[in-house]
Amino acid sequence: MAERAGEPDVLVVGGGAVGTMLACDLLQQGVSVRVVDRKEVVDNGDPHSRAVLIWPRMLELLHRIGVVDDLVSLGFRITGVGYFSGGRRLGTVPMDRLGTALPFTLSLPQRDIERVLRARFAELGGEYELGTTLEAIDPHGPEVELRGPDGVLSTARPKWVIGSDGVGSTTRRLLRVPYPGKPFELGISIGDFPVTGPLGTEVEYHYSRHGLLPMIPMTDGVGRMASIVPPVGDGWESFTREQLQEIVNKRASLPYRIGEPKWIRTFQPRPGIAERFRIGRTFLVGDSAHCVVPLGGQGLNLGIQDAFNLGWKLGGVIRGRLPEPILDTYESERRRAAQQVTAVVDKQILAAKQVKPLPSLVRDVVVDAMRVTGMLDRVVAPLIGGVGLAYGKPQRRSLLRPQPRRVRPGQRVPFHSTAGPRTARGLLDPERFTALLWPGAETPGTWADDRTRVAALLDAAAVRDLAELAPRERTALVPVLGRRPVVALVRPDGHLAELAPVSRPHAVLSFLATTTASGRTSDPATLSAG
């Protein structure tokens, strides 16, 4: 059995979208990465693509690896999500008022997303080893056996292993990690069609007594349609265009005409969440760790967040910036995220099943009430757009309860409410914690001394003085950080880690001392001086 010389820091099993994103993030941090994939060739011509939406928060994260401009140039900008029933609009969930770097959702088939990611991976010096399968794994070494395209077995001993090999993950199976979940009893038919009619810039959900019809606008006048259908075998593949048009006529509240489908596929989802996301020095990400019913386009977005949640932590540990225990937070944080998205998707499925008169009337009244009360804007939009996810201690709060506007530890810091897309990218260090020194609504006369004193204690973080922001950007952050001077410690992924008054920064310094490899505590008297 052959053994590879010069083992990498990280072995990624599975070179799809999530595995490639994580590999790019690690390569940018100076971490050596090896990516293997069972596919023998990369087929850029495959028209099938289940995933098609990248929500605003995930576009924000993709800035980390420098691919957003290319993705946006290829995709279609979605401004919101519209809900229709019985020929009328029930309400709209806006995606352009979430306070994100890019105030829209991007409609782009996953095959095109992967093409852009592969190009970036190559720019960073990465190479895929195609036709290579994982045969055995010791997660604690870690040590793996790989079979190459020539059939020869080899042994690899990287420092860490990432399983990103999909729902049927070989990595997960070899680790003997159970994958419990309630089987989805029906199938999902999806297809891309030329569309004539009032298709605008929204994802549309058309409810009717005949069932649900989602419609997603794409480039070149093409729309993605989907439907819940009987078990696989009774999908759209056997339907004529006329029969499919009849489905549209019965379900859509708007007058659409469709052309011959570009492609159709019916499949049966296998939703579930793995019992463990980490064993020893091996991690599961993306569909290897969790899978949701693809109603709302959340599956790929979960994987994107997995990649960047693990990327900055693992890169920091390998480069000596962070202690290894920080990796324990990956599973707890991402499991909670998967559970939240599953709950959101379950509510969408429940709404889609309401076809009898009374339940469908109740559903429509509820959606209309959420529109009138502003809940579609303040609650549903953050959940769908990905900005409503908070890490940290679990909180007993309903999904339908708005998050407080003042940022709290665990929440994403909304830099972009009106401050423009450059703000967070210019302020946050992509590899270290960033300490934002906030002078408050009015800069105090002692600010220069306060800033110098506190900055001298924050040697484990990048320090940014928010007093230097333009007045418009300062004004936008007052509702987020408050009117008084504070130190806001922010993670590389934009979530608030800790918050403390500038006059008493003990909490921030204690967090750094326990969470970073170079953090230190200081004399309390020194901390309170000034």
Image: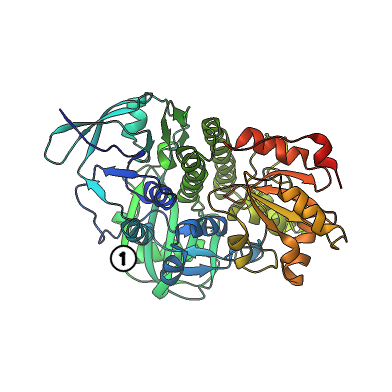
Q: Position of residue 45 (x, y in %)?
A: 25, 62
Q: Residues within 10 Å of mark 1 (few under 14, many from 20)?
A: few
Q: Residue at x 29, y 60 (%)?
A: 47
In the rendered image, which quarter contains the N terminus? top left
Q: Position of residue 250 (x, y in %)?
A: 49, 62
Q: Position of residue 12 (x, y in %)?
A: 34, 41
Q: Quadrant of residue 418?
A: bottom right
Q: Residue at x 75, y 59 (%)?
A: 374
Between 201 and 331, the one nearer to me in the picture: 331
Q: Is residue 278 left or right of residue 414?
A: left
Query: How many numbered tags mark residues here?
Result: 1
Q: Secondary structure at mark 1?
A: loop
Q: Is residue 185 left or right of residue 144?
A: right
What kind of residue is marked 1? Lys
Q: Position of residue 362 (x, y in %)?
A: 69, 50
- Compared with 385, 233 (above or below) is above
Is residue 239 visible to the viewer in this orientation of the structure? no
Q: Residue at x 51, y 69 (%)?
A: 77
